[in-house]
Amino acid sequence: ANTMITQVVEMVTDYEKYPRLQHHLRSIERNDKAIVFVETKKGCDQLTRSLRGEGFPCRCIHGDKSQQERDETLAEFKANKIPILIATDVAARGLDVKDIAVVVNFDMPNNIEDYIHRIGRTGRAGATGTAVSFFTDKSSKMAKELAHILREAKQE
């Protein structure tokens, strides 16, 4: 595990996830980028709508978006016109964006490999990064593996 990444795991209920996400997004530095991972396309759309309604500059990518929409969204994200990207795992595969400061697991992934893959989007090329994960009762099957990863990265 990458020690350049600060991993933060918050034990939350489903109701607490959204206010916690807002808190983390508000504390991001002005020119920093963030990716927020969600489990479903519907969740991706809903979260994006809610955040935009509260003034957060964000867009989403998922499998139902056309290639053109995805390309436009990624170009805006890379150029920092839109600093917050809401994404599903599938849509984020092969995403090559260097300077991502924060990764948020709004929904925990289903396995530890996807967790490592997601948080590896930050802390690249010698830069530091932060990964915030919202851990709910549904995520408990991953607890042991997650604890192991955090220990490996020296983050109890």
Image (cartoon, rainbow, N blue to C red):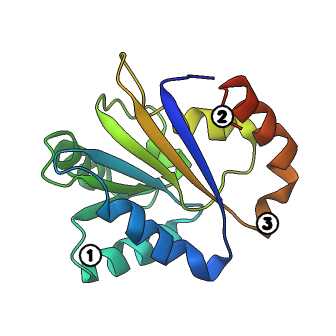
Tell me if residue 147 comes above or below residue 46 in the rendering. above
At a point 80% along the width and 32% down the height, the residue shown is: 148
At a point 45% along the width and 34% down the height, the residue shown is: 121
Q: Does the residue at mark 2 contact the one at mark 1 (Cβ under 8 Å)?
A: no
Q: Nearer the viewer, residue 53 or 73?
A: 53
Q: Amino acid at mark 2?
A: Gln
Q: Nearer the viewer, residue 57 or 95?
A: 57
Which mark sits nearer the N-terminus, 3 or 1? 1
- Indicate the quadrant containing the C terminus: top left, top right, bottom left or bottom right: top right
Residue under numbered circle 3: 138
Which mark sits nearer the N-terminus, 2 or 1? 1
- The x, y position of residue 64, in whole percent, is 44, 61
Which element is circle 3 on? helix
Real-space CA distance between mark 2 and mark 1, rounded to the nearest whole angstrom: 33 Å
- Indicate the quadrant containing the N terminus: top left, top right, bottom left or bottom right: top right
Which mark sits nearer the N-terminus, 2 or 3? 3
At a point 30% along the width and 56% down the height, the residue shown is: 84
Which element is circle 2 on? loop
At a point 44% along the width and 55% down the height, the residue shown is: 36
- The x, y position of residue 100, in whole percent, is 33, 38
- The x, y position of residue 62, in whole percent, is 44, 57
Q: Amino acid at mark 3?
A: Lys
Residue 109 vs residue 69: left or right? Answer: right
Q: Amino acid at mark 1?
A: Arg
Tell me if residue 14 comes above or below residue 155 in the rendering. below
Structural crowding at the residue carrying mark 3, measured as other residues with C-alpha within 10 Å and reported as few (<14), some (14–19) or many (≥20): few
Structural crowding at the residue carrying mark 2, measured as other residues with C-alpha within 10 Å and reported as few (<14), some (14–19) or many (≥20): some
Viewer-side label of 2, 3: 2
For residue 155, the mark is: 2
Residue under numbered circle 1: 52
